[in-house]
Image (spheres, rainbow, N blue to C red):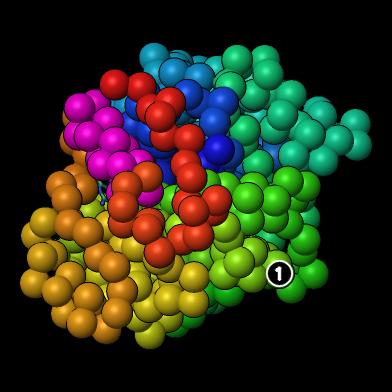
Amino acid sequence: MICVLTGGTGGAKFVDGLRQVMPPEEITLVVNTGDDLMWWGLYVSPDIDSITYVLSGLLSRERGWGVKGDTFLCLQAMGQLGEPTWFHTGDRDLAVHLLRSRLLAEGKTLSEATSVICDKLAVKAHILPMSDSRVETRVDTPIGELSFEEYFVQRWYQDPVNSVRFAGASDAEPAPGVIDAIVSAHAVLIAPSNPVTSIGPILAVPGIREALCRAQGKVIAVSPIVANAAVAGPAGILMAAEGLPCSIAGIARAYEDFLDVLIADTRDAGAAEALRGNGLRVQCTQTIMRSAEDKMALAKTVLSFAAAGLLSDKPAARAAAPFGSVND
Ligand code: GDP
C-alpha cells in the first residue's frame, strides 16, 4: 500500500499517472479539504472531487477540474436567476455535490459520504479526506480575509497575500484511517501540489505531521516548483508570504521535519546538488506532466525511487515495498 498526500490540479495530474502504473486498490489518498465551500447551498469539496474524477476516469483533462464533456445548463440558469456564477460547476459535477450534501444532511461524515460516492463511481483506490471536521483555508489580503476559492477562483489570485491560516485546524482530528495509512504505508508520496494551500492544510491537522515523522516507509515529495517558479498557479506567491523561497530549497524546508527524498526537475540539477550538500536525498527527473505518457513516466520513476536501493537505509522489513505489482 502506498499513501499519497494530495490536493489541487498538480496532485490530480500526478495521481492520474499513478493509477495507470500500479493497482489503484493499493493506493490510499489523503486529500486536502481546506478549499471546501458551500455553493448554492451545497457542500463542494473541490480537491476530493478532482481526485474522485481522476480515479473514475471522469476528470476533464482539458480543464483539470470537473467532469469531461459536462454541460453548464444549471450554471446558466442560476445566472439568469441572479445567483453568483464565479465558481463553475457543471451539471454532472452538480449531481455529486447534491448527493454529498444529502448524505451529510442525513448525518454521514465527509469520509462516509466520500466512500459512498467512490463506490457509486467504481473508484478502487481509497480516498480519505484529511479530516471530517471543517478546516478552512483563509488567505489574508489587503482587502480582508478571503476563503481560498474567493482568492483563487473569484479574484484570480491577483491580491497581495499577507499570510495564510487554517481556521478550525487546531480542533480538528485526522479522518479515520489517515494516521494508519501514513504510518503503515510502504512509501508516502507527497504530490506536486501547492505546499501552502494544498498540502499545508493537511499538515495543519494535529497528528498528521507527527505521523509523517514516524512513517515506516520513505516520505518522498515531488516538487511543484521547477526552475524557481510554480509550474502553474500561486504557489510561489503563497510560499513567499509564508517566508519560504520559491525554489526546491523552499519545498525541502516546508517538509524538512519528515522528508526523506525530494524529486526535483532536471532543470534544478544545480540547486539539487546544493541541497544534497545539506544532507537531503534529491533525485532529478523530468517532472513536467504535459501528456499521459509524461504522467505515467513520472509515476513510474517515483515508484522506482521508492522501491529501489535508495531506501537501503530503512530496516529491511520496513523497506520491503509491494512494487512488484507495478504495472508496465
Ligand atoms: P494551486 O493551483 O496553487 O492551488 O495548487 P494545486 O495544489 O492545485 O496544484 C498546482 C501545483 O502543481 C502548482 O504549485 C504547480 O506548480 C504544480 N504543478 C502543476 N502541474 C505540474 C507539473 O506538470 N509538474 C510539476 N512538477 N508540478 C506541477
- Residue at x 57% of width, y 69% of height: 213
- Residue ranking furthest to the front: 316
Please tell me whether residue 31 is drawn above or below residue 95 in the rendered image.
Answer: below
Q: Residue furthest right?
A: 107
Q: At 17% across and 57% down in the image, what residue appears?
A: 284
- Is residue 235 something one can see in this rendering? no
Name the amino acid, label 1.
Pro
- Labels in figure, total: 1
Q: Is mark 1 within 8 Å of ligand 1?
A: no
Residue 2 position in % (x across, y down): 52, 42
127 and 279: which one is in front? 279
Pick the residue in front: 321 or 44.
Answer: 321
User: Is 162 above or below relative to 22?
Assistant: below
Residue 42 is left or right of residue 199, and the answer is: right
Q: Residue at x 13, y 65 (%)?
A: 268
Q: Where are the magenta residues, as a range?
A: 292-306
Q: Any magenta on residue 299?
A: yes
Mark 1: which secondary structure? loop
Q: Which residue is mark 1?
A: 206
Q: Is residue 317 above or below residue 247?
A: above
- Identify the main secondary structure in magenta: helix
